Amino acid sequence: MKKLKFIFTILVATAIFASCDWDNYDEPESFLKGTIVYNGEPINVSYNDVNFQLWEPGWELSYPIDVVIDQDGSYSALLFNGNYKLVFPDGQGPFRTIGADTLDITVNGDKNLDIEVEPYYMIRNAQFSATGGNVTATFQAEKIITDADARDIERVNLYVNKSQFVDFRTNIAKTEIGGGDIADANSISMSVAVPEITPTQNYVYARVGLKVTGREDMIFSPVQRIDL
Amino acid sequence: MKKILYILIFLMAFNWGCNDDDFLDREPTNILLDEQVWSDEALIFSVISDLYFRIPEYQSVNYWQGYADFDEAFASNFGDYGRHKNNDWGYGEWGLWNYGYIRELNLFIQKAQSDLTSDLDPAVKARFIAEGRFLRANAYFELVKRMGGVPLILEPLEYDFSGDATYLQHPRAKEAEIYDFVLSELDAVKSDLPDDANIKSRATQGLVLAMKARVAIYAASIAKYGVNTPNVSLPGGEVGIAANLADGYYTQALSAAEELIKSGTYSLYNKKEDLSENFANIFIDKANNPEVIFVRDYVQSERFDGRANTWTLVNQPWSGAEDLEGGRTNPSLNLVQSFEMLDNSFATFQTTTEEGDYIFFNDPMDMFAGRDPRLAGTVILPGSKFKGKDLDIWAGYQLADGSVITGDEFGQRKVLPGSETPVQVVGFDGPIDGREYSAQSGFYVRKFMDTATGSGQRGLKSDRWWVRYRLAETYLVAAEAAFELGNSGKAADYMNDVRRRAGFTTDLTAADITFDRIAHERKVELAFEGHQLWDLKRWRLAHIVFNGEKVDLTDKPWKADEVSTRVFGLWPYKYYEPGSPNDGKWIFKQVLPGQVTGADRFRLGNYYSFINDDIRNNNPQIVKNPNQ
């Protein structure tokens, strides 16, 4: 009797484990990776803020796959093989798309795809230095879009944080210059005092951001580690 | 032979049976038929009651959490701390797509207008039709507030089972078209409704005017302030109203508000000598209340199905709680410091002198002395009473050496230095950081709180009402509309009416009236009445006030566009220094509750809620809202 019970248990267990393999769907396994770039240079944005959508046509009901862009402009999505349409929702990002607003992409195995966009401004030559507990940044704001779509600078900000996530939400120090107060966009200099950090930390991360009027998302310089 | 007989009997039985139509045609015993319902006034009344019952709400007395989503209150409840840890709101929040309700309203109107009701008294019939149309207009107002322009469906839609449902798909109307529809419906139904200030939970002429004023001022401010957020619009006009329409809407708002105010049907509540009590009583006095226009009424009930008001139960001070819960909605210091001084000036709370020493008070109430009496009518302050019992809000003993002795249980006892007997070191109402039901901001809510014994028991709860429209709001709409139309003198008059009732003795002059003044007056007069979100949306200020940055509490509480992303608290302490003249006196500290780790960020895509993918799959003509 005991033996029978044992065999029965084994049988049931086998059936349960074997069936997992049998009735599950395959998981998606193709990586779509890349960076949002302008002329090959990554566009840095704030985390969790800028996203695009992938739509797979052909289904009766369509739901987008939201792909969020990381701080350094990179993105990645794990997808099933297939044809997708890539769309930036209205008003997303500190840039406009080039040409058609929809990009057709075919995913068949891992794929690297850098997406070219046209930002309103680019932050060039951002240099950071630390002197006497202050972080100083100098940079240039280059106007990229100069046609009818051109926008003015609303403000530029210098953000400092103790972790690598640096933007208007997560910072320990920040300073701001309004768009009208920028004398020369080719040489902007900002400086902010770093407050005391507990636990003590002898380095910080910093970057500068630029907001154009009428666009929600800011463009940033790459995050830089600064030793105090 | 026998066989034939049987067959014959059998056949005859069948034949007669078939003939007997009455036998098979039975009246159903579990549902009421159209002819039964629509010929009986009492039954039609119960149908319309159900439709009143289902008016969509966002923040209300039965959804206290809604106030903690923004900066009016802290949520002192374990399950709701997330409201202060999040950084932004989902695009779908406070969304609404209740076309099931709209369909039932359309069916109600269709049947009320049909011959089914021809036996009713024509005035009764007209009133039912008017109420149905009022509720439908209100439903569209609730939709347009949240979603912008929506498909305007005015007939019950029927599917013909042809396999092709495209003829049922309607595109979104323009935002202005929905507002115009609501306004014109209100005009159309007004004369069929009674003009009786004692009817509070059904539509009246007074309600139509109050609602018209509110609807028109919303449309007007979207038209006027929409230019500040050009991104929050759609090319088809489904979102956004043209700026040149603003004046027209402001004029409509002003004339509707003035018609109501001048009619004299309602008046501002002024029954009690004590001004704070008078203000608090507006919301709990159900006998001949002259100010309240439209309410959602409740009864006491042991059930939790929405028929009883749970506000008092969930928010009662812990020290005097009648059941094992309470204290959830803690008004924020952000709100409390907005109440101005009685000389019309503004002041934040000073806890220390310029040298950094504590300021000592003999009584915690002294901290709030000289303020707008509406403060104590809206908020239960430390040192005040509720239901005749003293509140016990204090966070601990402040020692002279800078350390603090406090407890993590309500009313905990500890030994103070230089003594041997344990004494109570923290109030029975807290504040204890992270302890639910304690006054974690240092305050409890007073508005809408029922003072009747038993209203804090789960088995009874409260029968007080939720006030949706009251005359003071109409005054403020009139003031806002007059100001926007360039008539500051008139705006000052209407503002002063409300402020005099509140207890201000010095009138504002026309020169004092600014946009900030009006926005501020709405903030303090209408706190916890569910206006904040819609006001900040229509003024296009939400993305400025909630900008996601972790900033300190503003010291400019009179400004409408000051950043306020986190809720702060103000905690009273007892000072302990035996022998010193300050021993036993009170000090205060401004705190950021430990649960507040996020900073609210209202994104441009939050202005109009997300219309989800299912809706757009079913009806591809629906365009998305902007910035999502």
Image (cartoon, rainbow, N blue to C red):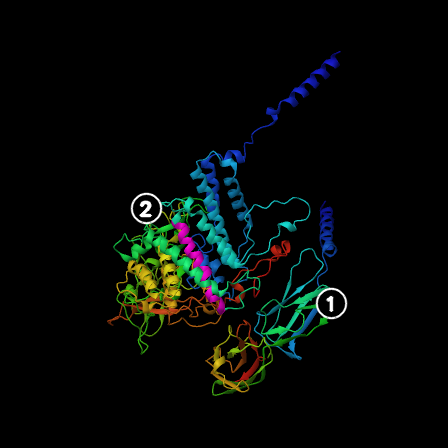
Q: Residues within 10 Å of mark 2 (few under 14, many from 20)?
A: few
Residue B9: in magenta span: no
Output the chain of dot 2.
B
Compared to residue B12, the image places residue B601 above or below, namely below
Label 1, on which residue?
A106
Quadrant containing the N terminus of chain B in the rendered view: top right
Magenta segment boundaries in residue numbering = B206-228
Q: Is residue B76 visible?
A: no
Q: Position of residue B572 (x, y in %)?
A: 33, 66
Which element carries disc 1, helix, strand or loop?
A: strand
State the count of labels.
2
Q: Position of residue B177 (x, y in %)?
A: 52, 56
Quarter-wise, where is residue B60 in the image? Answer: bottom left
What's the distance in space between the residues labelled 1 and 2, CA to CA? 70 Å
Label 2, on which residue?
B287
Q: Position of residue B356 (x, y in %)?
A: 33, 77
Q: Tag 1: residue type?
A: Thr
The one of B123 and B157 positioned closer to us in this rendering: B123
Q: Position of residue B564 (x, y in %)?
A: 43, 68
Q: Is residue B338 visible?
A: yes
Compared to residue B115, the image places residue A141 above or below, namely below
Quadrant containing the C terminus of chain B in the rendered view: bottom right
